[in-house]
Image (cartoon, rainbow, N blue to C red):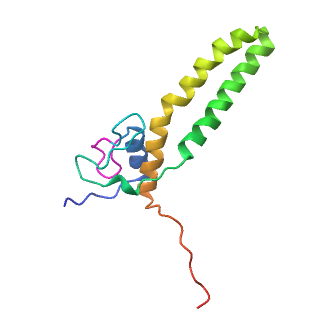
Amino acid sequence: MTEYPPTTVLQSAMRGLACKCPRCGQGKLYAGFLTLAPSCEICGLDYAFIDSGDGPAIFIIMLAGAIVVACALIVEVKYQPPFWLHAALWLPLILVTTLLPLRSMKSLLIALQFHHKAAPGRLVDRAK
């Protein structure tokens, strides 16, 4: 088995944003749009450890919500368009600001989870 040198947080983040394997940086992380591959085809890293949960979706919702609400408020105050125009403007923007970055955000959190060797919490008996 090939030994991989340790990476910096920036290298791990760049691998994540590129949707590449967090260990080797070359293999594909996804088999579909958000479906993870079972393992890396280059280094063989088993992706069973990955559990990004709802973190990526929450980050994207917060960022997209701030962008869309700020834009909608500015347009409403300056131009006061009818409601149908609001729907025509903001529904596509919501789709773009949520779906496009979701894949990269998920892989970024996976890469950082791998970099920091994140694991489920365990209770420690300190009474001894």
- Residues in magenta? 20-28
Quadrant in the picture for residue 86: top right
Observer-nearest residue: 105 or 50? 50
* Residue plotted at (76% across, 21% down): 73
Quadrant in the picture for residue 31: top left
Residue 51 place in picture, x, y as percent = 47, 53
Q: Is residue 34 magenta?
A: no
Observer-nearest residue: 100 or 25? 100
With 111 as the anchor, is 4 left or right in this view? left
With 10 as the anchor, is 1 left or right in this view? left
Please tell me whether residue 73 is drawn above or below residue 128 in the rendered image.
Answer: above
* Residue plotted at (23% across, 46% down): 41
Q: Mostly what secondary structure, the magenta segment?
A: loop
* Residue plotted at (36% across, 50% down): 22
Q: Quadrant of the N terminus?
A: bottom left
- Give the total of numbered labels: 0
Residue 47 place in picture, x, y as percent = 35, 52
Q: Quadrant of the C terminus?
A: bottom right
Residue 43 place in picture, x, y as percent = 23, 52
